[in-house]
Image (tube, rainbow, N blue to C red):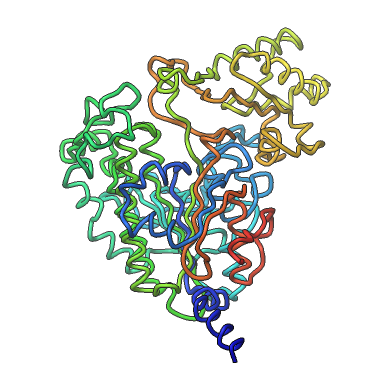
Amino acid sequence: MIRIIAITALFFFNGFLIRSQTDKPKLVVGVVVDQMRFNHLYKYQERFSNGGFKRIMQEGFNYKNTNYNYVPTVTAAGHASIYTGTTPSAHGIIGNTWYQRSSKQIITNIEDNNELLIGTDAADSYGGSPRNLLTTTITDQLRMGTNFRAKVISVSLKDRGAILPGGHSANAAYWHDWKSSPGNFVSSSYYMDELPNWVTKYNKLEKSNSYLTDSWSTLYPIESYIMSAPDDNNYERAIAGKTSATFPYDYKSMRERYKEIGAEFQLIWVTPAGNSLLTDFAIEAIKNEGLGTDEITDFINISYSVPDVIGHTFGPQSVEFEDVILRLDRDIESLLKSLDATVGTGNYLLFLTSDHGSVPVASYLADNKLPAGIANIKKHEVALLSHLNSKYGTNQWIENFDGESVYLNQDLIKQKKLSLRAVQQEAADFLITLEEITGALIASDLQSQSYSYGMNQMIQNGYHSKRSGDVILIFKPGFVPNLDPRITMQNIKGTTHGSGYAYDAHVPMLWFGNSIPKGKSVRKVSVIDIAPSIAQILNISYPSGATGEPLTELFD
């Protein structure tokens, strides 16, 4: 009798865990915060509300040692890796852009001139699609695993933040078209011929316009932002309509300046209002699409782009960045409250991560006596071409040099009957002699050897034989590659990202809701482990190229 009571008590006290492990979530919510480093969860946590980031951290599971395992750490590659469960070496999204040898042009990750934008009045009406994504996503697997009865909706301010997570078979992907008036959410003809009625009605509310009728002042008294640099400093860009990067930001006067340059509603991307706008739209999508209302698990991705734009503009040390994260915390709280009300507490599963981090502004690092510098790519390209000319004769040996990747003129090398591997190695050997460069791997080695650790492995994981360059470079920590020769340590402002160093690669990963135990781990994991974990929770197949592993702590 005592044993029966004890077993009953065990089930009672662990009732939520046992129930949630046997019941699938009605809705999976993927939240990606663009350019959020792991430490931001703790740097600002004292002023988080109890219902946003803090609620997820306290009630869910926190992987404190989540890292990207490839380079480059950029938005498109990050979103693709999260949802495919693999690296660019398999899914093919090797950057936001890359050089295409066949057309001899730079292409974007979701570029598709066969598709049109749906829901815009802008002159540039080319849409986009996930056709450059070479593998399936966890959202594709959910669609197939339910005989396409599951709904998948993906929303972001950025087109790539919406399209890539939705995979090839999403019901819809929506993003913010700042070129249109009054800043509509749009889609692509890849998904639909016209916007659903609820999206059209939402656009008619002119939320972008209403959010830009006020001004942006700090959430708390500005003197209390002691975790950031002073509001007036030399590390931030002043945006259109402002003479300095300082509070307050008067939207009315700034809109006039943005309107003059044909970008009136782009202003919302550089304000916390952009996060609120996206949260509103995501909540409407959940309600109007009926997500999480039946026995078939649905999926929504929400990708918050504003922190990335703020970081690039002002830097992670800025009061602007801190205030955006504090206000995003309130938006996350609103999202969770809406999910509790519409889907039901415990009925949805949510994960939150980031597509990459960011390096502190180089001049900020240098002023604080920390390693930093600028790698002048144009200078390096001129030096490399001069070296190859002296070695093989004057000619156009370089097709493209875009930062970390060097594309050699393979047709010319073949025409001259030279060994491609030898020319690659010659270029790499020269480049590694330059001060800012600490490593250079050639394509021939990346295709024939296997690197098992460190930065070399990260480069190999980010290398795709059909799309990547002939030489991939590694720069010193704190050094940022720059294509504009006018940029110096004295005038560089705002941050960037893309390296394999901790500031770019170490990101948050939080799990919350249905089937998720409470806890935390410092075990080293990767964002490519997210998709296999969801597959195990939902009992569906892994994405076709998945190389990540299920996060075992979620099943303990």
Image point (55%, 39%), residue name: 505
The image quadrant that residue 306 belongs to is top left
**Is 296 on the left or on the right of 332, as rendered?**
right
Which residue lies at the image location 61% right of the left edge and 86% below the top edge?
Answer: 3
User: Residue 285 placed where, x, y %?
Assistant: 37, 66
Residue at far top of view: 390
From the viewer's perspective, tell me whether residue 384 is left or right of residue 421: left
Q: Nearer the viewer, residue 330 or 545?
A: 330
Q: How many marks?
A: 0
| Horizontal and vertical percent position of residue 517 | 52, 66
**For residue 435, side relative to residue 444 (left or right):** left
Can residue 190 be seen here? The reply is no
Seen at 33% across and 64% down, the residue is 199
Residue 307 location, quadrant: top left
Quarter of the rendering occupied by the C terminus? bottom right
Position of residue 430 measured from the top left corner of the image (x, y, whole percent): 70, 15
